Image (cartoon, rainbow, N blue to C red):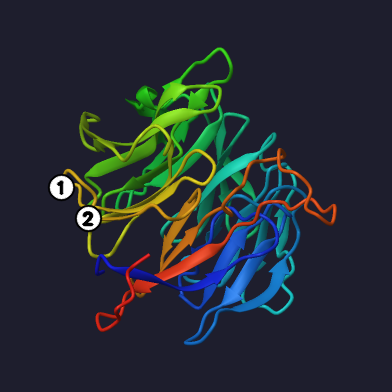
Amino acid sequence: MPIQLENKHTVGTDGQLFNGRFTPCGNYLVAGGFDGQLHRWKLSDGEPAELPPISGHQGWAQAFAFHPSETRVYSTDSWVNIACMYYTLEKPQAQWTHHLGHDGWIRGIQLTTAGDTFVTCGRDQAVRRFKSKNGKLLNEYLGHQADVYCLAIHPTSQTLVSADAVGTIIVWDTKKQVPHRKFDASELFMKHRLQDVGGVKTMTFSPDGKTLLAAGTRPSGGGNVQGIPLILGFDWASGEKLFSRELGGKAEVYVQDMRFHPEGYLIAVTSGNPGTGQLLFIDLDQAEPTYKNNTLANCHAVSVHPNGRTLAVTATSKGSNGNGRRLDKDGNYLGNSSPIYLFQPADPTSTDPAP
């Protein structure tokens, strides 16, 4: 993809969204919301068309994943629920719902390549595997001593990996249901007198499966959280740490999401102090990013369209500051919102600068 991009469309809702993702077919964009719904847009050559949202959750719909070959989405929430729905239907209804997926907030979900099972992780420090057809619990993997934040599945061996709030990465022996080995990403964590900071926010494998990448922040403060966005690379065969890649200053704080582009380079987004965000293209053989956009506020998810040309970056409205903002002149409280920016390569004949 060229390093000059332009924002072709911006979609979103009045409330906050977590993570805009393209479906495997490329015809839809889906994002989980603080309102407990999955919001949908049908994509075509023109303006993205908003569809009725998918309801069914009682808490924040933070994590979801698509079946690789069927039009099913598996979604989780900040309570204990997992649901399966068909995202192409006009009025989707749950095919099944699991009301005790975890004890508390479910933070991550991954489907296997075949799509026959999926894995979840959460606040109860557990990792669980379910049958995708009916939501039946198959296995439970215990070994973390902190909230489990994210999951990854090796692209060829289908080995399961999970990572937690203190930087412990576990590679699982899924047959024996015990840890097989561990990677140390504890430099992504700091115990602070005001609040613990950090953890592994996101993981991914290099396309060849030889390197595991884990990302978060190198913390430096725990009040108004400060830290340098950081990606760690581990040799998958030996577990040796290969590199540490810093991506900005202390105000940028967290790498929130990262994905490899089909052309081989890494795309990452960061979110830091209110209003601070970055979209980065990274060649791991080069010291500096090949593309950087720091005009976006608090980027917390990135998705690559199957065509390789379109990116969806989920951000937060500028000026967001939690519950501390004043009422407007009409006495209304204006909450945060989450624009999703759809970027494409800039027209080489255009004189407009890239964002």
Q: Which one is in front, 121 or 275? A: 275
Where disc 1 sits, the SS reads loop
Q: Position of residue 322 (x, y in %)?
A: 67, 41
Q: Position of residue 53 (x, y in %)?
A: 70, 68
Q: Residue at x 50, y 59 (%)?
A: 116
Q: In the rendered image of this protein, does residue 184 appear above or below residue 234?
A: above
**Quadrant the N terminus occupies:** bottom left
**Residue 99 bears which disc, if any?**
none
Q: Position of residue 42 (x, y in %)?
A: 57, 79
Q: How far, Cα to Cα, is label 2 from label 1? A: 8 Å
Residue shown at the point (35%, 47%) measured from the top left:
204
User: Does the CB distance between marks 2 and 1 fall below 8 Å?
Assistant: yes
Q: How many marks?
A: 2
In this figure, which residue is indicated by the disc labeled 1?
A: 286
Report crowding for label 1: few under 14, some 14 to 19, many 20 or more residues within 10 A (C-alpha): few
Image quarter (top left, top right, bottom left or bottom right) of the C terminus = bottom left
Q: Amino acid at mark 1?
A: Gln
Q: Quadrant of residue 176?
A: top left
For badge 2, the amino acid type reads Thr
- Report the front residue among 143 and 216: 216
| In the image: residue 35, left or right of residue 210 | right
Using the image, tell me which numbered label, if any, was put on residue 290.
2
Tell me residue 192's x, y (percent).
52, 15
52 and 247: which one is in front?
Answer: 247
Extreme-top residue of the structure: 193
Determine whether 2 is above or below 184 in the image. Answer: below
- Element at label 2: loop
Question: Farthest residue in the right direction?
Answer: 331
The answer, for residue 111, to whether it is visible in the render is no
Report whether 314 appears left or right of 262. Answer: right
| 147 horizontally vs 238: left or right | right
Circle 2 residues within 10 Å: few <14, some 14–19, many ≥20: some
